[in-house]
Amino acid sequence: MSVLNPSAFYLLPLLGLILFFYLLKGKPRQIKVSSTLFWQKIRQTLTSQRFRWRLPPELLLFLQLTIFGILIVALAQLFLTLRGKEAEYVAIVIDTTASMQATDVVLDRLSVAKRKARDLIRELSRRTRIALIQADDHPRLLVNFSDDRAFLLRRLEALKAVDVEGDEEVALKLAASLFPSGTRKKIFFFTDGAFEINPDSVPRGTKLVLSTSKAPRNIGITSLKIRPRMIGERNYEVLVGVGNFSSQEESFTLSLHLGGKLISKEKLSLPPHREGRYIYSVKARKKAILRVELEPHPRDDLSVDNLAYAIFGSSKNLDVLLVSKGNLFLETALSAYQCINLYLKDRLSNSQEVADYDLVIFDGISPPSLDQGNVVLIGVLPPGFVLEKTVPQLNPVLTEWEVEHPLLRFVDLSDVNVERALPVGVLPGGKVLARSGSFPLIQVWQKNGLRLLFLAFDLYQSDFPLQVGFPIFIFNLLQWFHPELFDPNYYQIQTGKSFPIPTEYEGGEVTILSPHKKMRKFEKVESGLLFSQTQITGVYKLNGEPFFAANLTSSEESNLLARASLPLLEEEIGGRLEEEPAKRKLSLSPFLVLISFLLLLVEWYLYHFPLKRRN
């Protein structure tokens, strides 16, 4: 027995107050009355108080002392330390990434992991509460701590591997965050260990349960990149990366199909643990699907990385409006692209016309009010924006620029000279790409359906058009506004990533069909809507037309060797895990308060209904 609040015993001297009042006794007083007939009993009450040295044998005195003493002990918070077996908490994390589809074990790695997890669930004590977590690119909790074994097993059996990379660190942190405070963490990660993770970031109490063979064999497509030979034409170069993740040389056949037609096929081989890159020329006169297929010989333990797809961009041209009094630099740079229909105007008074073009460039011409469209402003203020100063900024020196931003990629601004610039501030919610001291020279701004690029200086008042980076900047500008036309890799993503639904479908209804024929319908498309259910490799279709392609192309997932340096479960799961005795504190205060309350009721009854002595 232990005490949490020993200072409560300082109240024990208060018991003396009860004893003090009981030591007081009455002293008789003499009163003259006419008759004593009716005053026989009053002699007992009409007394004065005096101190007596012997306590009367009163039951009420004993009860009052007992009640007060019990309450003092209750305030001291006594508790008993009991030994027993407390309810145990176990978190089970199941790896469902692409590598768990490997068939180097029967039937596959995920099946083995589910069998071992199933054995663990059945063998754990009935008092054990179990949480189930699925670990893929976005780990999620399937079952919080529960003792419903049937429900846990149903959710476990429903798990399927998907064609994505994993985020193992987030999955383990999620598992560790579920445990109640003060409980010991037990996390079992059922996986193949085909990943690398920092051991310091792994919660304590984590153990791996591996489901893999010692010598898996696999080759897979690790990259698929496309670049045009010349912008505006339909000739492309296709770069295919293939990796051999086996411990021996592997042979394979690499074939390319365009629109269902075979355009290239060759037999190749790779040394162990090597990656090769192969370049092919492809001509695509219209929107088409490119399928790259790898056929291993004679064995391959993972098939999902043997296919990759690409969708070549739309063959439509881009309508570009240049609102200017004449700019030879811009006209020449834009006319160099055969896929651009260039229109020239010297003014634009109706804001509705902005939405009629894919891109509108205002070169020194003030634009009307803008609420949608793709707009470039050169040397002119955005609508509703005022200058911070009335005097222009003379000979501003570019002090910094965002070299990582897509608009300034491969663009060197170190030798650019500007004669004068508008002394503007940062647009509300805008992003500055280049600045001179505290004044921005190039910035972007986008909201809802409006995307805006603002240059604070006139091109003719700078030597920027004479720099080698100017045509690169124009290309980056076109690609930033319309990547679907100028980026041949736009229509392919890695599995698990999101893909934007085109703005032309805003407010309308679209239906997206996944490669495994699962349909998703959006009745009213909102601006900036992203489609994120891309965990399966293949071509996704929008309203029946090829939309985009999702590929695994991951060296991490194609490498089937166990590389995680985490503690392993040393023995097979076949017996009940050892349950260590735990200490449990039992507080006595509630029981003492209840006893004192019952004694108080007895004391009240005896006070109002005293027991009569029998003679």
Image (cartoon, helix red, strand yellow):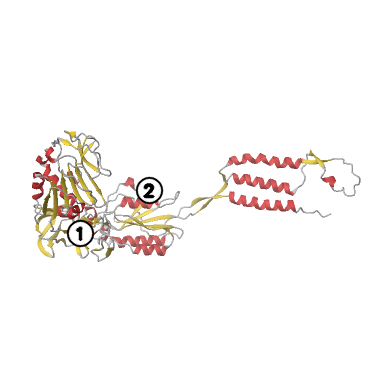
Which residue was labeled with disc 1? 549
Q: Could you tell me the amino acid type at mark 2?
A: Arg
The structure residue drawn at horizontal position 19% and vertical position 60%, both measured from the top left corner, is: 306
x, y percentage for residue 343? Answer: 11, 52
Nearer to me, 215 or 361: 361
Looking at the image, can residue 106 be seen? no
On screen, residue 3 versus residue 438, left or right, reads right
Q: Which mark is residue 204?
A: 2
Name the N-terminal-most of marks 2 and 1.
Answer: 2
The structure residue drawn at horizontal position 75% and vertical position 54%, both measured from the top left corner, is: 609
Secondary element at image label 1? strand
Locate the C terminus and report the quarter of the image it occupies.
bottom right
Looking at the image, can residue 176 be seen? yes
x, y percentage for residue 512? Answer: 24, 63
The structure residue drawn at horizontal position 80% and vertical position 53%, both measured from the top left corner, is: 613
Nearer to me, 406 or 459: 459
Nearer to me, 581 or 23: 23
Q: Which mark is residue 183?
A: none
x, y percentage for residue 193? Answer: 29, 54
x, y percentage for residue 118? Answer: 37, 62
Pick out the residue farthest to the right: 34
On screen, residue 140 versus residue 293, left or right, reads right
Q: Could you tell me the amino acid type at mark 1?
A: Ala
Label 2, label 1: how many angstroms apart (C-alpha)? 40 Å
For label 2, the crowd category at 10 Å Cα-Cα, with few meaning under 14, some 14 to 19 and many 20 or more, is some
Pick out the residue farthest to the front: 349
